[in-house]
Image (cartoon, grey):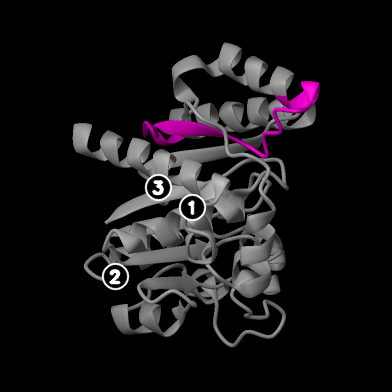
């Protein structure tokens, strides 16, 4: 099982789009994929028409058991998506109360890791969609992941958010003694605007080889796919954005083969 976390401490940078796009493309290559929604807003869960306000079981239940669940219990939380071969660990809005409820409990940073361990033979890939804040949910994602994907919108404020995210990552790696390789993914790139061009230039200057060589363009087909609850590659296999995500996936899989 390969586990990727999609994270940034700024919202609206295409974390959910990245999660869904890569999951769909991995499935098309014959892999069984589990997506994990750790964001209390539940955007990934809502994408597939499940209601985070009214869901029977969610990843919140894992935290209530401190991750000590059997394989059978872990499977009960899994929901199917519109793509056969891609499943979902849904979020509930109860996750918003998690920091307050578990603040005094130890061992809460490995809940997701423990739950995924019970599903190790069920999925080839797991992609975790995270909240845009540093807390127990993001810590769980970073602890479980083998690679971090950092989507960053090509605009000035998002570049500042990227600085906070890489600072957080360094702190976590120092405290856990774990090296977590990461890939920065420029998103929502509009080559018609100076803001996008300048932001992309700045990102490449600051992070060099850690930045994916292409940029995910602004593409209304992503919005259309969300409205239809479809993987972007199912809605438009040859769309501009999907083509770049295909290249990104090849890049990420090459890292696995080289390891």
| Secondary structure under the numbered disc 2 in the rendered image | loop
- The residue closer to the viewer here, 231 or 112, is 231
* Residue 106 visible: no
Q: Is residue 196 left or right of residue 126?
A: right
Toward which corner of the image does residue 196 lie, by quadrant?
A: top right
The mark nearer the N terminus, 1 or 2, is 2
Which residue bears the numbered disc 1?
238
Q: Point out the tag, 1 or 3, that comes first from the N-terminus.
A: 3
* Residue 217 position within the rendered picture, expressed as x and y whole percent measured from the top left: 63, 39
Which quadrant of the figure has residue 49? bottom right
Q: Residues within 10 Å of mark 2 (few under 14, many from 20)?
A: some
Q: Can residue 192 be seen?
A: yes
Q: Residue at x 54, y 18 (%)?
A: 207
Give the residue number, with chain letter if any, for mark 2: 118
Q: Which residue is mark 3?
A: 145
Segment colored magenta: 175-196
Q: Is residue 238 above or below residue 67?
A: above
Among numbered discs 2 and 3, the one appearing first in the sequence: 2
Where residue 250 sits in the image (x, y, percent)?
Answer: 34, 40
């Amino acid at each position: 099982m390969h586990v990727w976390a999609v994270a940034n401490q700024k919202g609206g940078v295409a974390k959910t789009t990245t999660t869904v796009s890569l999951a769909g493309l991995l499935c098309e290559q014959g892999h069984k994929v589990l997506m994990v929604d750790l964001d209390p807003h539940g955007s990934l869960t809502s994408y597939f028409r499940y209601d985070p306000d009214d869901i029977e079981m969610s990843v919140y239940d894992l935290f209530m058991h401190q991750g000590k669940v059997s394989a059978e219990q872990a499977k009960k939380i899994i929901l199917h998506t519109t793509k056969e071969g891609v499943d979902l660990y849904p979020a509930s809005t109860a996750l918003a109360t998690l920091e307050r409820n578990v603040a005094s409990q130890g061992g809460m940073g490995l809940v997701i890791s423990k739950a995924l361990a019970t599903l190790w033979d069920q999925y080839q890939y797991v992609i975790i969609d995270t909240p845009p804040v540093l807390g127990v949910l993001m810590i769980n994602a970073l602890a479980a992941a083998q690679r971090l994907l950092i989507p960053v919108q090509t605009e000035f404020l998002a570049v500042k958010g990227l600085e906070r995210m890489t600072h957080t990552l360094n702190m976590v790696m120092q405290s856990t003694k774990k090296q977590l390789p990461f890939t920065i993914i420029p998103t929502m790139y509009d080559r018609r605007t100076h803001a996008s061009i300048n932001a992309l230039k700045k990102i490449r200057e600051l992070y060099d080889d850690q930045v994916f060589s292409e940029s995910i363009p602004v593409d209304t087909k992503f919005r259309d796919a969300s409205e239809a609850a479809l993987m972007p590659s199912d809605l438009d296999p040859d769309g501009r954005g999907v083509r770049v995500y295909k290249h990104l996936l090849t890049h990420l899989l090459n890292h696995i083969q080289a390891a």
